[in-house]
Image (cartoon, grey):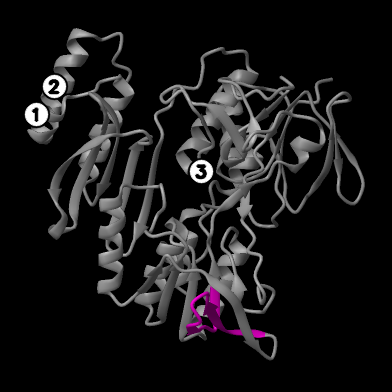
Amino acid sequence: MTNGVVIVGAGHAGVQAAASLREEGYEGPVVLIGDEEELPYHKPPLSKTFIKDPEAKPQPLRGEAFYTGNTIDYRPGVRIESIDAGARRLEVAGGGKLAFDRLVLATGSRPRLLKLDGAGLAGVVSLRSLADARLIRELSARSQDVVILGGGFIGLEIAATVRAAGRNVTVVEAVDRLLGRAVAPVIAAHVRQRLEAIGVRILTGTTVARLEGEGGRVSAAITSGGERLPAQMVIIGIGVVPNVELAEAVGLAIGNGIRVDQHMQSSVPEILAIGDAASYRHWFTGGDVRLESVQNATDQARLAARSILGHAEPFMAVPWFWSDIGDMKLQMVGLTQGGDHHVVLGDLAENKFSIYHYAGNRLLGIESVNRPADHMLGRKMLGAGFSPTPQTVAGGPDALKAALAAFSESEPAKARA
């Protein structure tokens, strides 16, 4: 009797893997392991609507009937101790074993810890789970001053949300601009200007030396320059680290994540890895990447299910990302590292523009603020393998649509979108 597929991790990647197995016709047992007690839920709203609205409820990825109706054995509140790859067996924390034919590791990532005096004080939090979001929502309701350490997407989403609720918000970023290497400097500067216009204080090129507390609760963050920033809540958002411990202990290849091939298989072919925890050689850039996005997680999950069923196509999804920061919807498609020039469409003053990034004549990616049509067209272009000239981009969306249509007609084999 088959032991089926066991999926460790019940986030976006794990749930999609379970769903895709059934959609692709897999009839064996499917066990989905989650370490939280909740039904699996959407994570992006946690830094926005959820912490803003005291009545907001988590948004389930799938209703309970989905799991029972598709004979998916969802097991919440379970932690896996170790993997025995030779015996194809998992050791469950608290006792018990779970056999598998194929194992999918969708273990995700966790907030990077901050080694800082005072980091253990009450009121010092990070956001990764529903429990974290509930705590931030509760603390926000009784905090007047909030300090956020880290100027990445999560930190800035929370900064805009908490500021809109009337709190005094200070963002402290160690490097000289927001959003690090995530977006172009012009977008980072634009985001900063919009946040400062609504009253968020932003300190770049600044670090925090320690946190101070009163009665065991945080009361202030002290910068390396000696400034005291009052804080009843400090949110640490300095990035994440992939959860690779199970994989590493069993001897799987590790390199900024669990190393997988173009079929999501690890160095032990019966064990696959997907989502935030997986690192792979990207077809578009030729470099090794580990992408943290819902789209990447779900696309890899779909491919992993097909790999388990014997389909051999490689992973060729075009990466795209999004973030809502105040009145800015940022949408990004492609990977823009290595770009050497860009073209801007739209108007920064109107808070609606897109940046098309090039390396020579090759379009690498597009970053858009409040121009969703540009983003969708960009996904079609990159998915089709079409790289318009900068001159065509300067002609605007109509010129781009016409050029894409002509390309798709003349080279249909290359047009995948």
Local SS, label 1:
helix
Task: Name the side, left or right, on which 189 lies relative to 38.
Answer: left
Which residue bears the numbered disc 1? 399
Residue 363: percent from left, percent from top? 27, 28
Q: Which range is magenta?
A: 217-234
Q: Are marks 2 and 1 in contact (CB under 8 Å)?
A: yes
Viewport quadrant of the C terminus: top left
Whether 200 is drawn above or below 42: the answer is below
The residue depicted at 60 percent of the width and 19 percent of the height is 307
Which residue bears the numbered disc 2? 403
Q: Residues within 10 Å of mark 2 (few under 14, many from 20)?
A: some
| Residue type indicated by callout 2 | Ala
Whether 245 is drawn above or below 111: the answer is above
Snapshot quadrant of residue 236: bottom right
The residue depicted at 56 percent of the width and 31 percent of the height is 301
Local SS, label 3:
loop
Residue 354: percent from left, percent from top? 21, 44
Q: Which mark is residue 292?
A: 3
Residue 74: percent from left, percent from top? 70, 43
Asked whether 34 or 376 is in front, the reply is 376
Local SS, label 2:
helix
Q: CA distance from mark 3 to mark 2?
A: 32 Å
| Residue type indicated by callout 1 | Ala
Q: Residues within 10 Å of mark 1 (few under 14, many from 20)?
A: some
Asked whether 357 or 167 is in front, the reply is 357
